[in-house]
Structure formats: C-alpha cells, structure tokens
C-alpha cells in the first residue's frame, strides 16, 4: 500500500471548491485514471460473462499500480477485485495483487465495523417498537455480493415509518449521533454522524476507519427535479410484508425491499448520480437482476415503473448495466424505458459507457436538469430557480429581488472553479 498523504484536509477543501476529483489525487493524471477505469471495466465484464479463470488484469501503459488503486477505490471496486484475485478468478502482477489484497482487508474490517454499529442502533430501535427497512448496501452487500466486505459503504441507509421518525431521532441522539441536516439536498432523509468521528484516513481506498454516517429515510421518494419528486408510491405508512420481507440477518429482524421494487429503487438511486455512477453500482444491478429476475418478473417490473412514471429514472442505470453485462436486462423493457426518457437524457446516456460513467472533472451540466420533462421546464428553472435551504431544494421559487443574487453566485462559483483549476 502507498503511504497515506498528510495533506488530506487540504485536498478535500480544494475539491469542495472545484468539484474536480483530480484535486483529490494530483499525482494521478486524468489519462492514467481513465486507462485504469477501462481496464477495470474490461476485467469486470469478463468475470461477469463467465470467462475462463483467471482473467488477467494488466496495468495499462499510461497507469501504474497506484493509479489503478485510486481508480479501483473511486469505483468502489477495490475489495471485489481483491476478492476475485484471492479466489483465483482474476490474476495480476504481484504489486497489484498486494494492493488489492489491502483493499479487501480494509473492506472486510469496515463491513464488520458497520455491522457492529448497525446492531448498536437496531437494539434500541426494536426496544422502542421502531420497525426498520434497510436500504442499498446494508442489504445488497449481504444478499448479493460474495461477502459483505466486497461492497464498500460510506453510510447506513435506514427507512422508518413517518410516525416513528421522532422516536428514531430520539434514539440516535441518545446514542450520541448529531444531525447534519437534510441528506444530500433531499427532503426525505436526514444525515446523522456518530460521536467522536475522525477525519478521512485515506483517499486511496475505503479505509476501515474512514468516517461513516446514518441516512435516516422516511420515504423512498427522491427530489430529482424541483417540484417533481420521483416516487414509487408503494410503501404504506409502516414498512411491512406487503411491500417488503422480513430479514433475520442481524440480532433484530429488519425489513428489506422485495422485487420488483428493489431493482427499481437501486436503478433509480444509481441513475440519480448520473455523472458519478460507480462501477460497483452497475455490478450490483447485474447481480440483483441475474438472481431475482425471470420473464414474469420483468413484466412486473415494467408494470411498476409504468404505474409510478419512474421509467426515465431507472433507464440510465439499467442501460449501462446492460452494456457491462449484455443479456442481463430484458430487451423489450429497456426499449420501453428509453422511449419514455427525455430526448436530452437519452442522448447523454447513449454517449456514456461503463468506463466513462464516473467523471473525474466537474460535471458538464447540472445533474438535476437531466430529469426535466420538457425544455420549457428546464429553461424556466435556469431563469427562475427554486430556493435552496442547506442544499435542499424548496417548493417555492426565489423572489424577484433574489434572482440577481442567484445569478451573481452562479458567476462567482464558476469563476472560482476556473481559477482553482489553473492555480497550483
């Protein structure tokens, strides 16, 4: 493993201004990062396609071992690649094998740590009668990946019924958690950090001791475009057997999403990070679809996204997952999903590959504008945006007196990013 940097806070601070991931790893050139991305995708696609073992992972001409490790960490693939190397599914030169073994070791330690923390939360929740539905990695890492440590997570996503929110917040406060406000600009969840959380220990792998948090959800809904939330409209006030199933993996029973809602939710969540779709999330969709879906299941999936008008939200992720593992997704369903997506979204998706879905540099277009249903809606939001509160988009638009201030902030932000990308 490479020695840790002693300037991690400075790198993170610079990235917060530029939103350019190259500021996190200035020693790794964009060309090296992209070459490593392409090699990882090639190897992953071969493994998923059942190519004879071992699949050889070679260092690209433009990349060294460190660049490959950074790209693997950014893609969330370091532990899984390490597992494939450890089990003989993938082979590589010794320096790469050693590095990926380190990723796997930290992945296992981190998974064990997060499991212990989840158990610490579930016990008082159960004592208060709070039912919990676990989402994303807290579910899929155990049920679909070879082992939990091969699917890195930075947080625990827990959904509770609206009438249990106050009790859940009380439990988290009693455990020493601090509320950080709306999670990622989303009104449907809040983010909670544990006590005595330390700083980031590594930017080059999912370190076992890197910070983590709890995302407390009250709904599966997500604010994709102002005034037009994505909603599956299926969960009753209390998560239960009608929309989930009981899972006995932990010391207290929890709920997990059942199909076809699980795949739809995972696909929509992956698509919502369109310019930063990590390879591990595409692998996750492939593993879930392959295990859970037959012809009848795809009909149920198509019916769900049609009833909930969520086709355009699940389309990008499923399209890219199909590019990674051809034949995994149902072709007629993908065709129907593409048909309901806005033209500009279809164009962006077609121009993207699994190897280019995660961008290093600032995004070329505001992510949420991709989800506008009409050009008029998009232009209106550009000209007269909604108010934001702590990153969360409100339902009301800015006042006429505030518009000039919004325009000035846009110009200032872009000017600062321009300068910071050119100043050492």
Image (cartoon, rainbow, N blue to C red):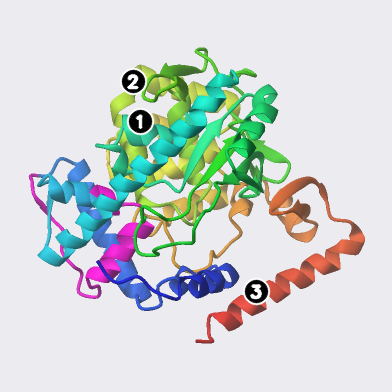
In the picture, which quadrant includes the N terminus?
Answer: bottom left
Farthest-out residue, bottom? 423
State the mark number for residue 414: 3
Farthest-out residue, top? 242
Q: Position of residue 81 (x, y in %)?
A: 23, 51
Magenta-highlighted residues: 52-80
Whether 225 is drawn above or below 219: the answer is below
Q: Residues within 10 Å of mark 3 (few under 14, many from 20)?
A: few
Where residue 335 sits, quadrant-wise, is top left
Q: Dots 1 and 2: beta carbons under 8 Å?
A: yes
Whether 33 is drawn above or below 386: the answer is below
Q: Nearer the viewer, mark 3 or mark 2?
A: 3
283 vs 241, nearest the viewer: 241
Q: Which residue is mark 2?
A: 295
Whether 177 is drawn above or below 353: the answer is above
Residue 57 lies in the magenta stretch: yes
Tag 3, which secondary structure? helix
Give the total number of marks visible in the rendering: 3
Of the numbered discs 1 and 2, the one sitting upstream in the chain is 2
Q: Residue at x 49, y 57 (%)?
A: 275
Q: Residue at x 26, y 47 (%)?
A: 80
Please indicate, yes or no, whether residue 336 appears anywhere in the rendered image: no
Q: Dots 1 and 3: beta carbons under 8 Å?
A: no
Q: Give the distance between the C-alpha atoms of the residues marked 1 and 3, in whole angstroms.
A: 41 Å
Q: Position of residue 249 (x, y in %)?
A: 36, 24
Of the numbered discs 1 and 3, the one sitting upstream in the chain is 1
Q: Nearer the viewer, mark 1 or mark 3?
A: 3
417 vs 125, nearest the viewer: 125
Q: Which residue is mark 1?
A: 330
Where residue 96 sits, quadrant-wise, is bottom left
Q: Give the distance between the C-alpha atoms of the residues marked 1 and 2, in whole angstroms.
A: 8 Å
Of the numbered discs 3 and 2, the one sitting upstream in the chain is 2
């Amino acid at each position: 493993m490479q020695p840790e940097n002693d300037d991690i806070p400075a790198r993170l601070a610079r990235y917060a201004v530029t939103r350019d991931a190259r500021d996190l790893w200035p020693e790794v050139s964009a060309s090296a990062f992209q070459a490593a991305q392409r090699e990882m995708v090639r190897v992953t696609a071969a493994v998923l396609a059942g190519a004879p073992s071992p699949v050889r992972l070679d260092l690209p001409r433009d990349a060294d071992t460190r660049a490959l490790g950074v790209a693997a960490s950014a893609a969330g693939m370091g532990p899984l690649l390490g597992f494939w190397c450890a089990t003989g599914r993938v082979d590589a030169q010794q320096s790469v094998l050693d590095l990926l073994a380190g990723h796997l070791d930290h992945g296992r330690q981190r998974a064990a740590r997060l499991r212990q923390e989840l158990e610490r939360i579930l016990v008082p929740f159960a004592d208060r009668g709070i039912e919990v539905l676990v989402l994303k990695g807290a579910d899929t890492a155990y049920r679909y990946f070879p082992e939990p440590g091969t699917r890195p997570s930075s947080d625990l996503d827990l959904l509770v019924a609206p009438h249990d929110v106050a009790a859940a917040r009380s439990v988290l406060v009693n455990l020493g958690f601090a509320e950080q406000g709306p999670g990622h600009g989303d009104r449907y969840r809040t983010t909670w950090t544990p006590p005595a959380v330390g700083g980031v220990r590594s930017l080059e792998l999912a370190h076992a001791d890197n910070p983590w948090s709890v995302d407390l959800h009250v709904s599966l809904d997500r604010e994709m475009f102002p005034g037009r939330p994505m909603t599956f409209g299926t969960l009753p006030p209390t998560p239960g057997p009608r929309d989930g199933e009981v899972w006995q993996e932990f010391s207290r029973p929890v709920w997990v999403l059942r199909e076809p809602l699980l795949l739809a939710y995972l696909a929509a969540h992956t698509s919502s990070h369109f310019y930063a779709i990590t390879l591990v999330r595409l692998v996750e969709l492939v593993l879930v679809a392959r295990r859970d879906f037959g012809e009848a299941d795809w009909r149920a999936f198509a019916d769900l996204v049609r009833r909930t008008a969520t086709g355009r939200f699940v389309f990008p992720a499923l399209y890219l997952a199909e590019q990674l593992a051809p034949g995994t997704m149902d072709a007629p369903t993908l065709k129907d999903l593409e048909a309901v997506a806005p033209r500009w979204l279809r164009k962006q998706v077609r121009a993207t590959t699994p190897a280019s879905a995660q961008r290093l540099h600032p995004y070329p277009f505001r992510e949420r504008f991709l989800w506008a249903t009409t050009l008029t809606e998009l232009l209106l939001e550009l000209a007269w945006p909604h108010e934001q509160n702590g990153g969360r988009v409100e339902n009301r638009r800015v006042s006429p007196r505030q518009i000039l201030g919004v325009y000035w902030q846009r110009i200032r932000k872009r000017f600062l990013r321009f300068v910071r990308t050119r100043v050492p």
